[in-house]
Amino acid sequence: MTRPSQTYPTNKPKLVIILLAAILLAATIALLALNIIFNLSKKKISDYAQTYFNQKISIASIIYIPANRLVLRDVSIAAITGPEKNEIIRIPRVSARFSLRELFLKRTICLTNMEMDKPKTNYSDFYNFLKNNFKQIM
């Protein structure tokens, strides 16, 4: 006596949804970890930038937005004259795009676009900053 072959119902749609949810969760965790690392490193980044300039550079926060965008909040450059800081420029939000090709192939960060929202500046100090630091900026 032969038994008829039984077909079991498959839960492929459910499996695909679970797999997609797991991938989405892993990507979200990786993005959060990367943003935490950037924010823990913002002091090192501003200190490194200060090696090129004689001014105090500060960044409130750094946010990475996939795939090639960084958003910096409350960026300021201040001249240090004695015990007080004289703010040259303050930018509430800077959005920078970089080349992924250059990052992966040459291991350098090449900015392709930069947008600054509502910069506030002391024009005479800013003019002197640009005049004295043109080579470092370029």
Image: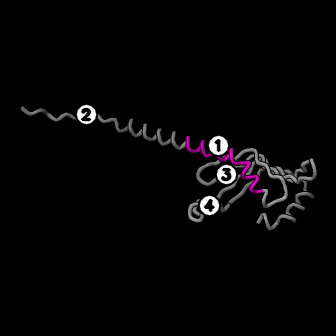
Rendered view: 124 above or below 27: below
Q: Is residue 98 left or right of residue 115?
A: left
Rendered view: 105 above or below 82: below
- What residue is disc 1 on? 36
Disc number placed over residue 70 in the picture, else none: 3
Disc number placed over residue 99 in the picture, else none: 4
Type of the residue with mark 1? Ile
Type of the residue with mark 2? Tyr
- Residue span colored magenta: 29-49
Of discs 4 and 1, which sits in the foreground?
1
- Mark 3 vs 1, N-terminal side: 1
SS category of the residue bearing label 3: strand
Of the 4 image quadrants, the one containing the C terminus is: bottom right
SS category of the residue bearing label 1: helix
**Residue 6 sits in quarter:** top left
Disc number placed over residue 8 in the picture, else none: 2
Which x, y percent locates residue 42?
A: 72, 48
For this orientation, the residue located farthest to the bottom is 135
Q: Residues within 10 Å of mark 2 (few under 14, many from 20)?
A: few
SS category of the residue bearing label 2: loop
Q: How far apart are marks 4 and 1 (CA)?
A: 22 Å
Q: Are marks 3 and 1 in contact (CB under 8 Å)?
A: no
Q: Is residue 138 within the magenta segment?
A: no
- Mark 2 vs 4, N-terminal side: 2
